[in-house]
């Protein structure tokens, strides 16, 4: 089994725009369409909450007017006191108004959070299922970190945007229209003055965003570089210390960190200018409106309470404009994230499985394997297996040998149908392997690779991965056969010891023994060993070899070996060179030919000598 690789995470950065905004938006709306009733509830409650909130300053202005008139009446001697009961009634009504507004806002927030998380859950579920359906060739050309980023960063970006931006768009537009209507109802003259400040505010925002955008992009870029430097240095800290590379690592980090500091400072400074400039322009508008409002009040065209209400509306008028500007940028980023997610979901999947009528059952398979004129290349331009033909009888122990890059591991990948052949066919008991469902086909195989794969769980669970319903006794028996039981018993918690994320709390040889125990527990029809004993010492290798000999009895076995001394007793040795079988036979037969295999065998002993 292959390991999980690491790679640079690709975050959706500020300023990144989708190639097709409308297509991504339509696709995302399709996911939201399943929750249309909930979205209607969100829209209704968001609008209602905003309207109730907008009405507040108007009623507060009436309370101010009542208070002002009462005080002025006392001064003029036309009234004896302020009508506090009326003011109290207005204030109680105002509290109720704001309370209902807050309740509606809570409801729409709760519903929208539920919707956005359900969409994120569905996207992650589809992405995870897609990963299982993609061919191995896809991962040959795409970094693991990029795939992980689509599931984490991009889906999180969509989730946050749906949770916040959808309601913000509704409330901002409603606020903009509602505040404008309320301002117009108080004084069209003052409203006209307020509108004059809008182009100035919009111009200031656009200039600042244009300047800061480049620095935000650089900030994310340098942040990724710094994270990559830290990850690489930490992951290879043993090598760094062994070669005295601390100084170089620190220098590399310092360069990236300095660039990140510079970009972050510039972006933060420029974006921090936005609100002070907006407030400055807004305050100019307030001053002018106050002067005009005072003039109108003196002439009796407007009440003092209405001036106070208008100033409140004017202060709130620019907020939805800024929010809409921010949301437009966020939506660009969200659609870029959605586009990456949907492009991944649209990737070409593995060749379709055979239909029920065409499918061959894996029951009763004995392990007869035939390669019929197989040709294959990882890319159409480069063919690495040429007209490969071989016939393996059930129960045979077959060794595949050759120089690095000869195509040994590729043959095994084709046999397990990780890749499909370009031409020719591979047959299992006379059936083309493409006639089996992939799950059924791979259930017949047990694999032990040179690169071990263990995950963050107990040792028992890692062995049990070969047979998920295995009992504890079956797990221990597999470990005993694989010569792993002794070292497991010496560990702090034995079979219940939890391996860390990198499984670095056991040695390389011990990791290999655990993967061999997993293959033994799986009890496969066909066994594949890809240099399975390369990470263990000579004594352990002999013990494992003996266990493997017992395991391979009655099973078709493929052994990929570089140390030819380990495959002397193989029933058939296939000697490969540049994708072709150049020799085949037993160990003694091939030595007697004094050809390619004999040259390989002798060179190993000469090197050892």
Image (cartoon, rainbow, N blue to C red):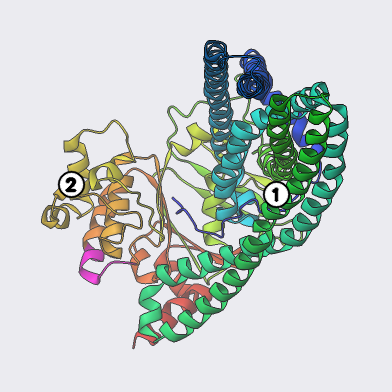
Provide the residue span drawn in magenta. Answer: 535-542
Side of 570 where 172 appears, left or right: right
Q: Most prominent secondary structure in the magenta stretch?
A: helix
| Quadrant in which the C terminus is drawn | bottom left
Question: Who is closer to the viewer here, 67 or 4?
Answer: 67
User: What residue appears at the point 32 percent right and 39 percent down from the top-left corner?
Assistant: 523
Measured in 3D between alpha carbons, the distance from the residue under mark 2 to the one under mark 1, in whole angstroms, is 66 Å
Q: Would you call the spot at circle 2 few (<14 residues within 10 Å), some (14-19), or many (20 or more)?
A: many
Q: Which numbered disc covers residue 38? A: none
Q: Give the residue pinned by disc 2.
A: 495
Q: Is residue 355 shown to the viewer in this render? A: no
Q: Position of residue 79 (x, y in %)?
A: 62, 14
On screen, residue 365 above or below 322? above
Task: Give the residue number, with chain letter if any, for mark 1.
Answer: 279
- Residue 199 lies in quadrant: top right
Foreground: 179 or 245?
179
Q: Position of residue 53 (x, y in %)?
A: 63, 23
Q: Secondary structure at mark 2?
A: helix
Q: Nearer the viewer, residue 183 or 106?
A: 183
């Amino acid at each position: 089994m292959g390991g999980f690789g690491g790679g640079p995470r690709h975050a959706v950065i500020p300023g990144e725009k989708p190639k097709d905004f409308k297509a991504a938006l339509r696709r995302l709306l399709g996911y939201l369409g399943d929750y249309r009733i909930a979205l209607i509830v969100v829209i209704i409650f968001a609008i209602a909450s905003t309207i109730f909130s907008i009405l507040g300053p108007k009623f507060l202005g009436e309370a101010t007017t009542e208070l002002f008139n009462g005080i002025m009446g006392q001064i003029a001697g036309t009234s004896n006191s302020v009508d506090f009961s009326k003011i109290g009634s207005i204030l109680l009504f105002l509290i109720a108004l704001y309370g209902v507004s807050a309740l509606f806002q809570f409801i729409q927030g709760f519903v929208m959070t539920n919707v956005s998380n359900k969409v994120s859950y569905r996207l992650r579920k589809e992405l995870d299922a897609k990963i299982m359906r993609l061919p191995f060739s896809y991962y040959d050309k795409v970094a693991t970190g990029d795939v992980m980023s689509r599931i984490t960063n991009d889906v999180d970006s969509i989730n946050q945007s749906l949770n916040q931006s959808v309601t913000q768009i509704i409330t901002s537009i409603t606020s903009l229209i509602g505040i404008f209507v309320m301002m117009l109802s108080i004084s069209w003259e003052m409203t006209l003055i307020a509108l004059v400040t809008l182009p100035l505010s919009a111009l200031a925002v656009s200039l600042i965003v244009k300047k800061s955008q480049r620095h935000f992009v650089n900030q994310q870029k340098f942040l990724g570089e710094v994270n990559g430097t830290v990850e690489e240095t930490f992951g290879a800290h043993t090598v760094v210390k062994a070669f005295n590379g601390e100084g170089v690592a620190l220098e590399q980090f310092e360069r990236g960190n300095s660039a990140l500091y510079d970009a972050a400072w510039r972006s933060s400074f420029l974006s921090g200018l936005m609100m002070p400039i907006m407030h400055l322009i807004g305050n100019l508008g307030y001053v002018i409106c106050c002067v005009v409002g005072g003039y109108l009040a003196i002439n009796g065209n407007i009440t003092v309470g209405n001036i106070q209400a208008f100033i409140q509306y004017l202060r709130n008028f620019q907020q939805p404009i800024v929010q809409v500007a921010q949301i437009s940028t966020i939506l660009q980023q969200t659609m870029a994230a959605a586009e990456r997610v949907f492009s991944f979901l649209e990737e070409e999947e593995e060749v379709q499985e055979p239909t029920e009528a065409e499918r061959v059952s894996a029951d009763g398979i004995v392990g007869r394997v035939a390669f019929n004129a197989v040709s294959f290349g990882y890319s159409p331009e480069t063919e690495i297996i040429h007209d490969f033909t071989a016939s393996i009888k059930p129960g045979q122990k077959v060794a595949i040998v050759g120089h690095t890059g000869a195509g040994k591991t590729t043959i095994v990948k084709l046999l397990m149908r990780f890749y499909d052949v370009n031409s020719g066919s591979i047959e299992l008991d006379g059936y083309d392997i493409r006639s089996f469902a992939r799950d059924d086909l791979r259930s017949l195989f047990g694999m032990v690779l040179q690169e071990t794969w263990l995950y963050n769980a107990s040792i028992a669970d890692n062995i049990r991965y070969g047979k998920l319903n295995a009992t504890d006794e079956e797990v221990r028996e597999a470990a005993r056969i694989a010569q792993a039981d002794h070292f497991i018993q010496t560990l702090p918690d034995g079979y219940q010891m939890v391996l860390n994320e990198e499984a670095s709390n056991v040695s390389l040889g011990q990791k290999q023994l655990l993967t061999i125990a997993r293959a033994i527990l799986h009890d496969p029809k066909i066994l594949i060993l890809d240099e399975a004993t390369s990470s263990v010492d000579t004594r352990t290798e002999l013990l494992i070899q003996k266990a493997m000999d017992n395991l391979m009895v009655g099973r078709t076995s493929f052994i990929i070996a570089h140390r030819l001394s380990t495959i002397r007793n193989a029933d058939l040795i296939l000697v490969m060179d540049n994708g072709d079988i150049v020799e085949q036979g037993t160990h003694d037969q091939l030595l007697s030919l004094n050809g390619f295999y004999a040259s390989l065998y002798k060179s190993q002993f000469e090197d050892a000598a």
